[in-house]
Image: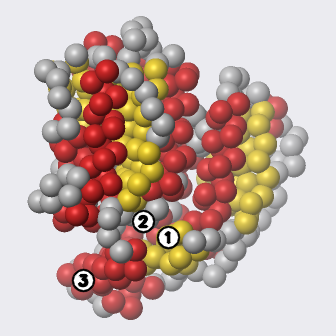
């Protein structure tokens, strides 16, 4: 089985989407071969356009942007559609993460990718939407399925099972297992810390033009 | 002021003299996810390509109108790119709105969001996604829902009062 892991983050390194794909791989039990792609620009690489056809599975991971797919990734999807994929025997999965605590807020982004599959004639596997994604990088040392990553681990296990069999099931919208009020507070403290590192004051966060 | 963002050349759109119309000049860069618009130059994007002040323009408008090819239920890449570059319109802090977590307002204006989508083969599922997406955007902008309409081609928008 050949699996393409497509990181749709706009960041070229240290992205949450990259971490997500790495962790998902650990859940999949087969002797698949993996190829990693970085879709962080509006144009997929020539290599990607030529080789995506050869895969059994495409797994996309990307951050939520304005309730949808980041524009550069949307552009890539459009270009792949224009280029065409002759192989219709491909199953597509995706994992969207957002800073919002509620995983369901990723649902439109998942549906947009599902609609792309409809146009492409590809099979839809499943999508996962993760709320509280902003905290995942700091939890990279926590094992999947434990503590704050318990529910995320369960969702990844379901997706991995589907991937092993090229099967489909309902999308899962979940979040980190961490109290919402504390996540909100830590995010606020985080922004204040970061803006001060940039030589500004906390009140500058409120700047209006 | 109405802010119209379109992937067409806008020449045939029925606009008013007070409207601000944003079209594609092939200079826009995609958001790079650096959060600079919140923590380096709050309220403004750090990428200087002419689209760095989109957040400010959002703050001056009463209606945001998207005229776009329907792309899988979303606005097209250019129009979505402009929306992505306007993240500075909102504040990084979270609030609870409608029982869910959303970003706090930076500004006080209430945006009415309308979208006019065109495309030869818009699937029923895409129309439903577009409707849900608009509602999600409105909640996140803390605005209100305007019009949502679908056309077979951009040409059909000629003469349509936005």
Q: Is residue A178 above or below residue A168?
A: below
Using the rendered image of the protein, determine whether residue B42 is visible from the camera's viewpoint. no
Q: Nearer the viewer, mark 3 or mark 2?
A: 2
Residue at image position (28%, 17%) is A55
SS of the residue at dot 1?
strand
| Color scheme of the displayed model | secondary structure
- Image mark 1: chain: B
State the image quarter where residue A207 is shown.
Answer: bottom left
State the image quarter where residue B136 is shown.
Answer: bottom right
Q: Residues within 10 Å of mark 3 (few under 14, many from 20)?
A: some
SS of the residue at dot 2?
loop
- Dots 1, 2 in contact, CB < 8 A: yes
Q: Are marks 1 and 2 on the same chain?
A: no
SS of the residue at dot 3?
helix
Residue at image position (34%, 45%) is A155
State the image quarter where residue A164 is shown.
Answer: top left
Give the residue pinned by disc 2.
Answer: A101
- Dots 3, 2 in contact, CB < 8 A: no
Q: Which mark is residue B101?
A: 1
Give the x, y percent position of residue B83.
53, 55
Pick the residue in front: B148 or A165.
A165
Give the x, y percent position of residue A22.
18, 42
Residue farthest to the top, as pictured = A86
Give the residue pinned by disc 3.
Answer: A193
Pick the residue in front: A56 or B148.
A56
Give the x, y percent position of residue A20.
25, 47
Q: Find the distance from the CA under tag 3 to the CA under tag 2.
A: 21 Å
Residue at image position (66%, 56%) is B135
């Amino acid at each position: 089985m050949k699996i393409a892991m497509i990181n749709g983050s706009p960041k070229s390194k240290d992205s949450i989407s990259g971490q997500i794909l790495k962790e998902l791989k650990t859940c999949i039990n087969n002797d698949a071969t993996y190829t990693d792609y970085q879709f962080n620009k509006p144009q997929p690489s020539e290599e990607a356009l030529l080789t995506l056809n050869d895969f059994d599975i495409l797994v996309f991971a990307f951050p939520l942007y304005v309730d949808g797919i980041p524009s550069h990734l949307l552009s890539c999807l459009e270009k792949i559609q224009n280029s065409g994929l002759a192989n219709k025997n491909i199953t597509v999965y995706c994992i969207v993460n957002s800073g919002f605590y509620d995983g369901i807020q990723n649902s439109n982004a998942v549906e947009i990718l599902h609609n792309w599959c409809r146009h492409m004639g590809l099979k839809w596997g499943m999508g996962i939407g993760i709320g509280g994604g902003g905290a995942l990088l700091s939890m990279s040392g926590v094992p999947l399925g434990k503590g704050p990553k318990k529910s995320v681990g369960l969702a990844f296990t379901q997706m991995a099972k589907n991937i092993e069999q090229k099967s489909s099931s309902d999308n899962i919208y979940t979040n980190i297992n961490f109290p919402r009020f504390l996540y909100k507070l830590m995010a606020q403290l985080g922004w204040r810390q970061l803006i001060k590192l940039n030589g500004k004051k906390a009140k500058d966060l409120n700047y209006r033009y | 002021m109405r802010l119209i963002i379109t992937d067409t050349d806008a020449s045939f759109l029925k606009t008013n003299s007070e409207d601000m119309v944003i079209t594609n000049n092939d200079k826009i860069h995609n958001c790079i996810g650096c959060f600079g618009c919140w923590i380096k130059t709050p309220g403004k994007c750090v990428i200087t390509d002419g689209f760095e002040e989109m957040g400010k323009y959002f703050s001056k408008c009463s209606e945001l109108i998207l005229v776009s090819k329907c792309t899988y239920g979303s606005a097209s890449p250019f129009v979505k790119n402009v929306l992505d570059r306007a993240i500075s319109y909102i504040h990084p802090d979270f609030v609870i709105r409608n029982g869910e977590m959303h970003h706090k307002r930076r500004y006080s204006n209430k945006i009415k969001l309308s979208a006019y989508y065109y495309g030869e083969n818009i699937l029923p599922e895409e129309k439903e996604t577009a409707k849900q997406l608009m509602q999600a955007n409105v909640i996140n902008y803390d605005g209100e829902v305007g019009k949502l309409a679908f056309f077979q081609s951009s040409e059909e928008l000629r003469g349509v009062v936005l």
